Amino acid sequence: MKSTALTFAIAAIGVAVFHAAALPLPWLLGPIAACLIAALSGVRMNGIKPLNEGMRTILGLAVGATFTPLVLASMVQMWPTLVLIPVMVLLIGLIGVPYFQRLWGYDFATSYYSTMPGGLQDMLVFGEEAGGNPRTLSLIHATRVLVIVVALPFLLQGVWGADLSNLPGAPARSVPPGQLLLMVACALIGWQGAKRIGMFGASILGPLIVAAVCALTGLLHHRPPVEAIWAAQFFIGMGVGMKYTGITMQEVRRDLTAGLGFCGILIVLTLIFVEGIYLMDLAGGMDALLAFAPGGQAELTILALIVGADVAFVIAHHVLRIFVVILGAPLYARMFKRPQD
C-alpha cells in the first residue's frame, strides 16, 4: 500500500514539474519521466492494476464516440494504407529477429517476441509460452513504447507545428449528466463483455465498439470530458514508467541498450513508410506517422486526440497491426525460425 501511494506521489510530481516547466503533454510525459527516474534510482513502485486497466476504457470511448456514418464510410477508402501494415510487420520481423539473435545473442523466442510490435501483455504471454525471457521482453517492449511516445510529440511539433496544448475534450461541466452516465455504461459493458469473450485489447476495443454503436444510432453525442482523458494519460504514463521497477545495471547494459538500438531501427522504418504514403498522397504526414508508429495503442490514441489527427484512421491501423501480430505469431515464428534454433 505504501509503495502504491509513493508511486502516485511520484507520478503527480512529474505532472507538476512538466506543468511548471511548460513542457508538452504534462499528464502523459510527466508521470513517464518521474516514474522512470524513480525506477532507475531503485524505488519500488506499484500501481492498482484494475484501475490502470479501467482508465484505458476512456480512450476506447473517446474513439468510439467519433464514429459517424460518414466516418464509417470513409474507412473503406483506407485500404491502400491498411494493406501496408502486414508488409511493415513482416519487414520489422526480418530485420529485428537477426538483430536481437545475432548481435545481442538472445535465443530465438526472446528475439522474435521482442521484435513483434504487438501489445506488451500479449507478447509477454506468447513469448514466455515459447520459452523466451519474460523480463527481457518486458524491458524491450517498455523501451519501444517509451521512446516512441516521448519522441513523437517533439516530432509532431517540430515538423508539422502540432499544437500539443490543445484540450483533448470539453470540460465535464459542459457535458450533460445523461451523456456521462451513458459513457460509464458503454465503458463497463464494452470492457467486461470484450474481456469475457477473450478479445485482445479488451479495455480499449470493447468500449470503442459499444460507444461507436451508440454514436452511430444517435444516442451518444459527446466524447469523454477533458478531465477523464487527463486521468487516462496519468495512469498510462505511470504504467509505462513503472515497467522499469527493479531494473539492474546488467539489464541496463544489455536489454535497455538492445531496446534503444531497435527503437532506432523502428523509427527509420516508420519514417520510410510515412514518407512513401505522403508522396503517394494516400494520407497526411501527421496521420500516417501516428498510424504507423509502432508504439502503444493507448498512447498513440491520446496523441491523435490532442493534435486533432484523424482518430478513426489512426486507430484502424493500430488495431490491424495488433491483429496481424497476434494472429500471425505462430506463422511468422515458423517462417523466421531456422532448424538449428
Image (spheres, rainbow, N blue to C red):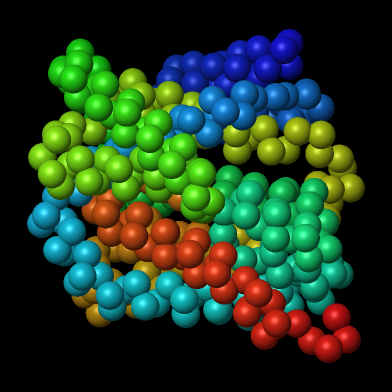
Q: Residue at coordinates 85% horizontally, 81% vertically from top-left? A: 341
Q: Nearer the viewer, residue 175 or 207?
A: 207
Q: As displayed, is residue 272 above or below residue 218?
A: below
In the rendering, at what x and y percent does residue 256 appear?
75, 51
Looking at this rendering, what residue extends furthest in the bottom direction? 339
In the rendering, at what x and y percent does residue 245 appear?
76, 33
Residue 121 visible? The answer is: yes
Q: Nearer the viewer, residue 143 or 125?
A: 125
Q: Residue at coordinates 57% horizontally, 49% vertically from top-left? A: 145
Image quadrant for the N terminus? top right
Q: As displayed, is residue 132 above or below residue 179?
A: below
Which image quadrant is residue 76 in? bottom left
Q: As displayed, is residue 259 above or below residue 231?
A: below
Q: Nearer the viewer, residue 182 or 16?
A: 182
Which image quadrant is residue 4 in? top right
In the rendering, at what x and y percent does residue 21 appear?
46, 22
Q: Residue at coordinates 27% horizontally, 54% vertically from top-left? A: 312
Give the left or right position of residue 147, taking residue 190 as reference. Answer: right
Q: As displayed, is residue 240 above or below residue 107?
A: above
